[in-house]
Image: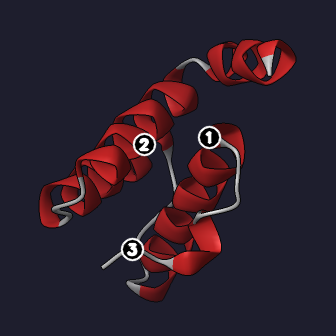
Amino acid sequence: MKDRAYESLSCEDEVRCIIGQAVIELSDEQQPVTKSTLALKLLSMADQDNDDERVLLYWIARKAINQPQQLTAMQRRA
C-alpha cells in the first residue's frame, strides 16, 4: 500500500523521509543511531517492502548515508 504523503515529494525529499523514518524506528527500539545501524535498518525496511520503487529509494537512502555528497548532487540537478 502506497503512502499518500510520498506521492507529491521529490526523490530527494522521499529519501530524507525514509532516513527520518529509519532514525525514528531505531530510536523507538532504543538502538544507537549510527551509519551502520541506519544502513542495516534501511536494508531491513527494504526487505519488508513489496513496492519496487520504494525499495529503490531505500537503496538510494543507504548510499546517501555513506556518500551524502551524492544526494546533494542529485538535488542540484533537479
Q: Which residue is mark 3?
A: 2
Residue 50 percent coordinates (x, y)? 15, 62
Q: Can you tell which mark lies on residue 57?
A: 2
Residue kind at label 2, given as amino acid type: Leu
Query: Element at badge 3?
Result: loop
Taking the spot 70% from the left edge, 45% from the top edge, the residue there is: 10
Taking the spot 55% from the left edge, 54% from the top edge, the residue there is: 19
Query: Element at badge 2?
Result: helix
Q: Quadrant of the C terminus?
A: top right
Taking the spot 63% from the left edge, 60% from the top edge, the residue there is: 17
N-term mark: 1 or 3: 3
Instruction: Please name whichever residue, 30 or 65, is drawn nearer the observer in this view of the structure.
Output: 65
Q: Report crowding for label 2: few under 14, some 14 to 19, many 20 or more residues within 10 A (C-alpha).
A: many
Disc 2 and disc 3: Cα gap in Å?
13 Å
Disc 1 and disc 3: Cα gap in Å?
15 Å
Q: Can you tell which mark lies on residue 11?
A: 1
Residue kind at label 1, given as amino acid type: Cys
N-term mark: 2 or 3: 3
> With 57 as the anchor, is 16 left or right in this view?
right
Instruction: Please name whichever residue, 67 or 46, is drawn nearer the observer in this view of the structure.
Output: 46
Residue kind at label 3, given as amino acid type: Lys
> With 41 as the anchor, is 11 left or right in this view?
right
Q: Residue 44's image quarter? A: bottom left
Instruction: Please name whichever residue, 20 or 53, is drawn nearer the observer in this view of the structure.
Output: 53
For the residues bearing labels 2 and 3, Cβ distance under 8 angstroms: no
> With 63 as the anchor, is 23 left or right in this view?
right
Q: Report crowding for label 3: few under 14, some 14 to 19, many 20 or more residues within 10 A (C-alpha).
A: few
> With 71 as the anchor, is 23 left or right in this view?
left
Q: Report crowding for label 1: few under 14, some 14 to 19, many 20 or more residues within 10 A (C-alpha).
A: some
For the residues bearing labels 2 and 1, Cβ distance under 8 angstroms: yes
Taking the spot 34% from the left edge, 46% from the top edge, the residue there is: 53
